[in-house]
Amino acid sequence: MSNTGSRSLIVQKYGGSSLAKPEQIQAVADVIAGLHAKGHKLLIVVSAMGKTTDQLVELAYKVSPTPNRRELDMLLTTGERVSMALMSMALNDRRVPAISFTGSQAGVLTDELHSNARIIDVKPVRLEPEINKGNVAVLAGFQGVSPRTKDITTLGRGGSDTTAVAMAAYFKAERCEIRKDVDGVHSADPNAVKGTAHLPHLHYHSLLDMTYWGAKVLHYRSVELATLLRIPVLIALAHGEGPSTLIDGEAKMYEQARILSVNSHKEVRWLRVSKPDLASAFQEFSAALKPGDLPLPQFLDTEMHANGCSFLITAPQETLTAVCQTAIKNPAMTLDQRDLATVTATCQGAYASPLPAEIASALKAQSIELHKMIFGALSVTVVVNAKDRERAIQTIHDLRPSA
């Protein structure tokens, strides 16, 4: 654990949309320079600029229909390296001593799984002395290195959030700030839903459920890590002033049944495996992915059939595409051709409540076909046709009380 011994250290993570243009990088550098002038020790985690990661994925699939996962990781990590170098340049121009580090240089150690690696340890032996000297450390998020294979790995889409939380935990930071182009967490995506409410304070458990079921405001595993290590996280604007959302273990919990937020997985698929039981089906699934070094998708639900087992899965698009391509080639696996999505109401006090029936009735009134309901301790999820996804989100959000 760190020996910096100061709670004045602040970890900030800046999202790619807030670093999309050179002038945005310069504006962020001005903010960081102001914090440095006040005497704060600073560790800055950056994502790739704008849509860089999407563009790199698209480029990879133009070159190869089934990109090698190791090489895909090598490609995708270049986006964050561009951001870290440019941010460091901008800070040094402002007479703020700054030095950039890749994930491997910063000692972010992961397992060997490409595209969705997990952090197993943090050993920032190069980074820590720089922070102690008063230099601003600018770290490329989303990436690390496997100590076993020595290969570069990526942490999955949104993995820069996890990098920031892991560093905040190691250094016992005063706070971990996730700076984005949105002013914290809303009751739904404000770009897609009318009448959303800003949520100023959330319990870890609520945000865990929201991110598990598709909320993009934070990477799920970053919330998982913050929950385990009790790291308060502030989500706020990268540019300008505005509201923010604090995530910690102190938020009020409510007994009345009401919808807190509505989130969605845009693309989910049913995948049938012709095995007589779930254990055999999981083994077949894992074995099918192993030759291509593919990570497991996110499993959302299962169903048993007379001739096999079905898994409802989702993943970042590049992973989901690769998994589906693998399934088509495997004689024991069949891909359901329906384009489906999930829509989830994260709830408070919804245990044994009429809320599921209200959701089903509201969707029926809008002629939205409901394929399945999935129940959790903090949520009610519906599986709908992808073409009905946005209407379903709005319909369920309209059930949320106005106050």
Image: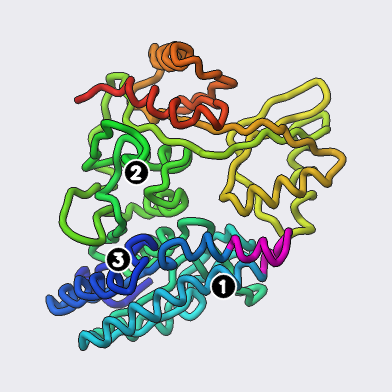
Q: Residue at x 50, y 24 (%)?
A: 375
Which callout, 2 or 3, points to the residue nearer the camera?
3
**What secondary structure prevails in the magenta region?**
helix
Q: Image quarter for residue 149?
A: bottom right
How dense is the environment of label 1, judged by Cα within 10 Å: few (below 14), some, or many (20 and up)?
many
Secondary structure under tag 1 reads strand
Q: Please name the residue that numbered disc 2 is placed on.
A: 204
Amino acid of disc 3: Gln
Residue 146 in view: no
Q: Name the residue under label 1.
A: 145
Where is residue 204 shown, x and y percent of the image? 34, 43
For the point 21% across and 88% down, which residue is it? Answer: 95
Q: Name the N-terminal-most of marks 3 and 1.
A: 3
Q: How many marks?
A: 3
Asked whether 68 falls inside the magenta stretch, the response is yes
Residue 21's spot in the image, x, y percent? 34, 69
Give the residue pinned by disc 3. Answer: 12
Image coordinates for residue 179, horizontal then vertical, percent:
29, 59
Marked residue nearer the N-terminal end (2 or 3): 3
Identity of the residue drawn at 79% across and 49% down: 288
Q: Residue 192 carries which label?
A: none
* Residues marked 3 and 1 touching at CB (< 8 Å): no
Which span is picked out in magenta? Answer: 57-70
Q: Which of marks 3 and 1 is in front?
A: 3
